[in-house]
Amino acid sequence: MILLTLLTGCSELETPVRATLDDGQVLMGMVSTPTLLLNGGLGAIPIPIDDIGEVTPVEGGDLAGSGNHVTVWLRNGSELRGEWARPEIQMGIEAGGIIVPVDVTTDELLRLQMLDGQVWPEGVVYRVRTSHGDDFLIDPELTQIELQNDMGLFAPFLSECISVAPIEGSDDWRIELATGTVLVGPLADDAITFALPMGPATVDVPLDVLVGLDRQDWGTASRDWLSTMDYERAAAPVAAEPMVGYGAGAAENAAWETGMIEDEIQRAAPRARLDSGGWFTNDAMRDFKATQKVESNY
């Protein structure tokens, strides 16, 4: 079981937050909580609140309907999933010249958003995916893959590797380095410690829950894609422009081009008003990630 809890303490940090409730209320105020703690399959993961974009129910609807299972979106598009067990969120709402303390229970919460927008990575990124539904970016310059064989212990940085993959039907892995060296043998541990550029400093991912280690180019592709998905243009009643979807297959790409664009047109106008204050929304990052071609996949 995975639990997401708020770490409390005597912090003076105040973070703007917006809570959208299932009865139509929208609360915008301040939270004096520096860190969220995610506990579960990947261990205890402290997440600085300044790195968080939003928290949403995994299954849609409110948190009660999703069994308190949430997706924590970081500003760079990383997703960490788990179960939020804390019964309420403490906020301060300014009204009438005073700060009114408010406790928001999770059974009425639809969405929790932080101020400021996305932090789009540039160039090549490395993504880790787990069977728990996590999908987060890692820092290849600080992440080492440790392989132990009869010749010794090798711990190249991921940035030195052309490919890293298990050998089918064996406990061994194959690591090919940019120098031309090819190493074969079991990994030194039953988990890989990944360094993250945003969110927790490191995350230990057990090999038995590791689904993918993907290398992708988010350089000009993200900027070109964003320009075609500009919310103001999408709100206008114009014909959808052709979109390039990578890796999903022709039929799925066609469905994405027709259905997703039409949905975007319908949602854009009200969402533009809601997000005019600079609150984080995962829409663009979620849809962009779904289109990305896997260049090398564990």
Image: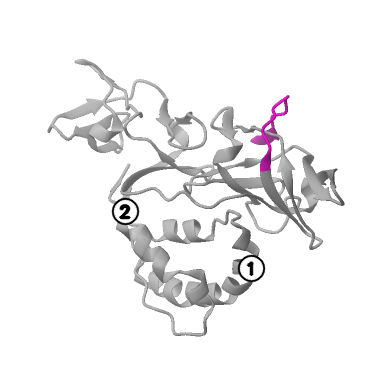
Give the residue drawn at x 65%, y 64%.
274
As for residue 7 lying within the magenta part, the answer is yes
User: Residue placed at 78% from the left, 59% from the top?
Assistant: 22
Q: Is residue 112 above or below residue 177?
A: below
- Look at label 2 and name its amino acid: Gly
Q: Secondary structure at mark 2?
A: loop
Q: Vertical placement of 222 versus 163: above or below?
A: below
Residue that extends furthest to the left in the rendered view of this protein:
180
Residue 135 x %, y %: 47, 45
| Residue depicted at 43% across the width and 36% down the height | 197
Is residue 229 covered in magenta?
no
Location of mark 1 (residue): 273
Instruction: Count the labels in the image.
Output: 2
- Mark 2 or 1 closer to N-term? 2
Q: Which residues are magenta?
A: 2-15
Image quarter (top left, top right, bottom left or bottom right) of the C terminus: top left
> Is there any visible trace of residue 251 in the rendered image?
yes
Above or below, 197 relative to 114: above
Residue at 34% over, 53% down: 218
Q: Residue 129: x and y, percent?
A: 44, 43
Q: Quadrant of the N terminus?
A: top right
What residue is disc 2 on?
Answer: 219
SS at mark 1? helix
Rounded to the nearest angstrom, the CA distance separating label 2 from label 1 is 28 Å
Is disc 2 in contact with disc 1, using a CB cutoff of under 8 Å? no
Nearer to us of marks 2 and 1 is 1
Residue type pointed to by label 1: Arg
Left/right placement of residue 273 relative to residue 9 reads left
| Image position of 165 (left or right of 57) | left
